[in-house]
Image: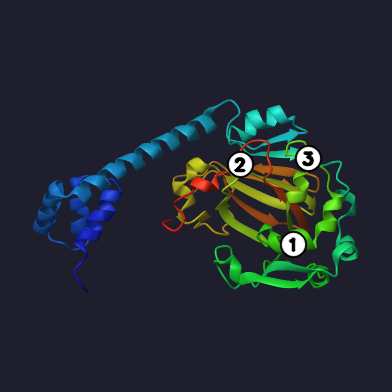
Amino acid sequence: MGQPDKRQLLAEGLAAGEDDAGLHARLVAAGISAASAKYEIGRLAKDPMATTLRRQAAKAAKQAWLFANQQRLATEGERGFRLDTIVKPCGDDFYRFYYEANRPAKIRGLVDHWPALSRWSLEHFSAVAGGVIVEAQVEREADPDYELTKDKHRKKIRFDELIDWLRRDESSNDIYLTAYNSGVNAAALAPLWDDLEPIDLLTPKAERDGFFWLGPRGTLTPWHHDLTNNLLVQVVGRKLVRLAPPWAFERMRNSRHCFSDWENYPLPAGPGDEYRPPVLEAVIEPGEAIFLPVGWWHQVEALDLSASMSFTNFQRPNAHVEDYTSWGAL
């Protein structure tokens, strides 16, 4: 076995906020002699990189303290940490208490006027657009990184082919027509937009810029956070949505882009603990919606054959991705 990399060990300890005693214990535990560990730690006093790492660790500790206070405010108040269900909210209330407060909500009565609620079915899809070519995500189950590597799972197929497959009513995560495929599907499936009507909370004609989702029961979007605020509207079937707050960042184990290392694990609803984040949970049924604020972690599972729409055209600024600079570094 080779000699442990002392500089690497020290860097990891400094980034974790360890003091000299903690660094010494780390080096000795790795097999470095006590005398050598003392010498290496003594050199850190004149090392500007060590000084910078210690300052960054202190900033991270303060950020953790701020997150902890956000958790206290969310859990110790009269309302507690919960997912509100709101019915036909007026725009002012929605934006004040949810959008601007970065607070999720399940919403009822928002799309009761949509013809899609009575029209959308596999038969309707086939009759209106069965002959068009659509794009879907395929062969997902064999790839644990299917969300991170979405491009290699894109495939163009005849819409009727997908519909015939869905008629088998098999549980699967292997094929899913998602928002990521909208570059092709928005034009191909435009006739379906005639079954939608404006939503009061969104900008005029926002339904024309929505994102269409269609897949079998068993489709699963793994734990991640979005880079915009999103409104997910359920039209056919049910979806189970789990959410975790931004202030649970460390427990969400974010090591790549906007994805969590929890991936498809069904984190249970509840307050969480030292290792698991607090989780809210809701089932959205046809005609119901859920507001997913930017930065909130969520996982979405189809409980039935499912058709949904998602929207980002809110009546407030929703441009958060422009200053998202950590992609590639994290």
Residue that badge 1 annotates: 185
**Disc 2 from disc 3: Cα separation:** 17 Å
Label 1 sits on a secondary structure element that is: helix
Residue 26 % position (x, y) = 23, 55
**Disc 3 from disc 1: Cα separation:** 21 Å
The tag earlier along the polypeptide, 2 or 1, is 1
Amino acid type of the residue that numbered disc 1 sits on in the rendered structure: Asn
Amino acid type of the residue that numbered disc 2 sits on in the rendered structure: Asn
Q: Residue 94 falls in which quadrant of the image?
A: top right
Amino acid type of the residue that numbered disc 3 sits on in the rendered structure: Ile
Residue that badge 3 annotates: 199
**Is residue 265 visible to the viewer in this orientation of the structure?**
yes
| Number of other residues with Cα within 10 Å of mark 3, as a class: few under 14, some 14 to 19, many 20 or more | some
The tag earlier along the polypeptide, 3 or 1, is 1
Residue 264 % position (x, y) = 58, 59
Residue 8's place in the image compared with 298, above or below, is: below
Query: Horizontally, is 89 left or right of 60 in the view?
Result: right
Residue that badge 2 annotates: 318
Q: Quadrant of the N terminus?
A: bottom left
| Number of other residues with Cα within 10 Å of mark 1, as a class: few under 14, some 14 to 19, many 20 or more | many
Residue 137 % position (x, y) = 67, 67
Q: Quadrant of the C terminus?
A: bottom left
